[in-house]
Image (spheres, rainbow, N blue to C red):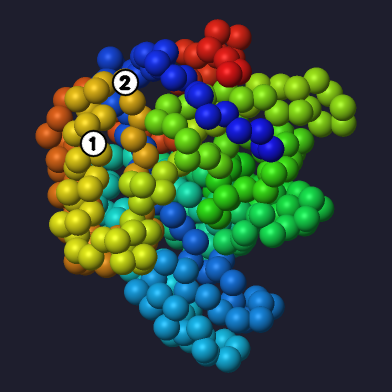
Amino acid sequence: MSGRDLIGYGRRRPGPRWPGEARLALNIAVNIEEGAEYAVPDGDPRSESPLTDAGDAGADVPGRDLAAESMMAYGSRVGFWRIHRMLTERGLPATASACALALERNPLIADAARDAGWDLLGHGYRFTKHYLLDADAERAEIARAVRSFTATWGEPPPGWYCRYGPSPRTRQLLVEHGGFAYDSNAYDDELPYWTTVPGPAGEPPRPHLVIPHTFSNNDNKYARGWWSTSEDAFVYLRDAFDVLYAEGGGMMVVSVHARLTGHPARAAGFARFLDHVLAHEAVWVTTRAAIADHWLATHPPALGGPR
């Protein structure tokens, strides 16, 4: 992952040929991180409350921060279920972007997501910053997460997404581990693409699929103060959807967190966005695994890349 590709598809963007001749593929990722964040009871020097209403309010709490733990727990106790209801009532699938430890500590979430037809995106064993790990620690993190997911979800995840960003070796470690159809450790496109990754133990390079994630259509803007109300979120997501729908042939990823969008005032904007989507024809609302399967079948690396 050390090289940079600043060209991508350029002017020659492929027609994705989405199922049903859809003009747009929409993937909603529901981040499930609560209980996997850094916390004193898990041996960390301090507690954290990433992407909550607290901001950095608890930065001076010595040791265990009970308020931070409580604000995180809202997502798994309440927020997830509100988002889950909104999606299932509308018959819309989603992707569970989950930390393995979060599902260990709340297996009801894994059951509900799987039963609703969601797919699983591996988001670490804990809510770990992979770019701070050495190679052995990162390799162990991936392996431990896969074992855990296999127990809680019933099968390993087909894709992987690190907290914020990967290390320079993450992609190669995923290929080394085997079993991953794609990763989402990129923000550089609105379509999937193929890249090459060195094979393990001196084997030849091999094609690897990337399905980019988003920090744009992402409710982390609430926690950073860039969105204030649900209307801010609705207008932002609606406008992104409308532009991509008018252009045709794109992929839109929306990322939400149960401890943010799961609050009532924010959930209202998410509901308006879902209803706006449903008011349009020829939209493929789907899982990330289904996008990966489609891209492999329709744009295999021998035809469309690697680029």
Among the 4 quarters of the image, the one containing residue 101 = bottom right
Relative to 184, is 82 on the left or the right?
left
* Residue closest to the eye, 198 or 284: 198
Q: Return the x and y of residue 304 as percentages of the image width and height.
A: 53, 12
User: Height in image: 6 above or below 163?
Assistant: above
User: Height in image: 12 above or below 251?
Assistant: above
Q: Is residue 290 visible?
A: no
Mark 1: few/some/many CA within 10 Å (<14, 14-19, 20+) = many
Q: CA distance from mark 1 to mark 2?
A: 12 Å
Relative to 230, is 144 on the left or the right?
right
Of labels 1 and 2, earlier in sequence is 1
- Residue furthest top in the image: 303
The quadrant of the rendering that contains the N terminus is top right
Circles 1 and 2: CB distance less than 8 Å? Answer: no
Q: Which residue is mark 2?
A: 249
Q: Return the x and y of residue 38 as percentages of the image width and height.
A: 59, 72
Secondary structure of the residue carrying numbered label 2 = loop
Name which residue type carries label 1.
Phe
User: Height in image: 79 above or below 146?
Assistant: below
Q: Residue at x 62, y 48 (%)?
A: 166
Q: Which mark is residue 241?
A: 1
- Residue furthest front in the image: 6
Relative to 74, is 282 on the left or the right?
left
Q: Return the x and y of residue 3 as percentages of the image width and height.
A: 66, 33
Q: Return the x and y of residue 22 as percentages of the image width and height.
A: 27, 20
* Residue closest to the eye, 167 or 282: 167
Secondary structure of the residue carrying numbered label 1 = helix
